[in-house]
Image (tube, rainbow, N blue to C red):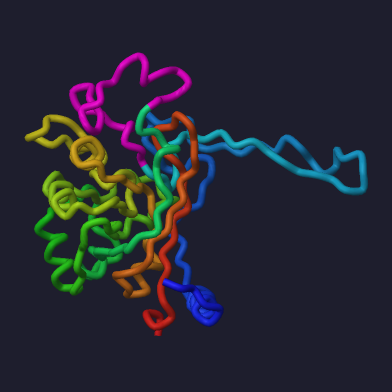
Amino acid sequence: MTITKASFDEFIALATATRIIDLEQPRFPGMPMFPANAPNYTFMLHRRHELGLETRTSAAGMILSADHSGTHIDAFCHQAEDMCMLGGVPVTAQNQQPSGMTVMTAETIPPMVRRGVLLDLVAHRGVDRLPAKTLVSAEELQEVARLQGTEIREGDILLIRTGWGTAWNESDYMTGAGMDRSAANWAASLKVFAVGADNMSWDLPGYVDEELGHSLPCHTILLVRAGIYLFENLNLEELGKSGVHEFVFVSLPLKLVGATGSPTRPVALIAAAQNA
């Protein structure tokens, strides 16, 4: 395909007219997170303008944060089943070191520019937020997709809106809704590239699946068995209220060597025609 000046200008015009919806939650000390992932998030200002020796002054700080705090994506090394990670790679002293993991780590997560789809449970149920501790099944997700007229294709980014993104500043955020094992198996059968939701973990925190016999069954099915990435703590309110269910999803995880996940600032790109 030959790129002409006219076609490039047309591309720039289209990009300029595109609405960008931010899908990241703000980061602040005390924001919700699993206790096991502490520390949470701290920013410390250690260079101050009043300490400058010139007319030009500087301010700078340090960030202390867990790799699974705030809006982030899980790397495949984040979970193991029977001490084996994705592809049967065993957890060993060689690939699990104090300085970090050495296989399937955050720096291997690729930049993502993919078709994204939103299944809006809030609109489907006609509520502001799903009830606390709701388990969402594959059957309901399939029904939402059918009623929305949303086709989910191989390689898509599948996002689920539960309404719990509005509780990001509330103490009961972790009690929000989550997907059950059937939902993860369904997503895996569709061969999506990644899933995400406006809750703590896509799973329901604290729920133990009877068949698997452990918590976070969706993490096991998606990360360990199927090789599907997980986005957590998304802000899907503006996207949901736009009424758009198909969009361009963009995420650029940080290349954090040895990390088991990465903070990211995902966005949804919506064409001007979709906004009309």
Q: In this view, does 151 lie to the left or right of 14?
A: left
| Residue most extreme to the right | 54
Magenta stretch: dominant secondary structure:
loop
Residue farthest bottom in this picture: 276
Please state which of residues 147 and 267 is positioned toward the viewer in this rendering.
267
Residue ID at (15%, 51%): 183
- Residue placed at 16% from the left, 60% from the top? 141
In the displayed image of the protein, which residue is found farthest to the top?
93
* Quadrant, the C terminus: bottom left
Task: Please tell me whether residue 233 is drawn above or below residue 127 in the rendered image.
Answer: above
For the N terminus, the image quarter is bottom left
Expressed as whole percent of the image width and height from the top left, the position of residue 128 reads 30, 65
Residue 208 on the magenta segment: no
Instruction: Estimate the x, y position of residue 138 in percent, counting from the top left.
Output: 12, 55
Say which residue appears at 30% left-offset and 44% top-offset: 201
The span picked out in magenta is 74-102
Front residue of 17 and 111: 111
Give x and y (percent) for residue 133.
22, 47
Q: Residue at x 22, y 32 (%)?
A: 87
Q: x, y percentage for residue 247?
A: 35, 68
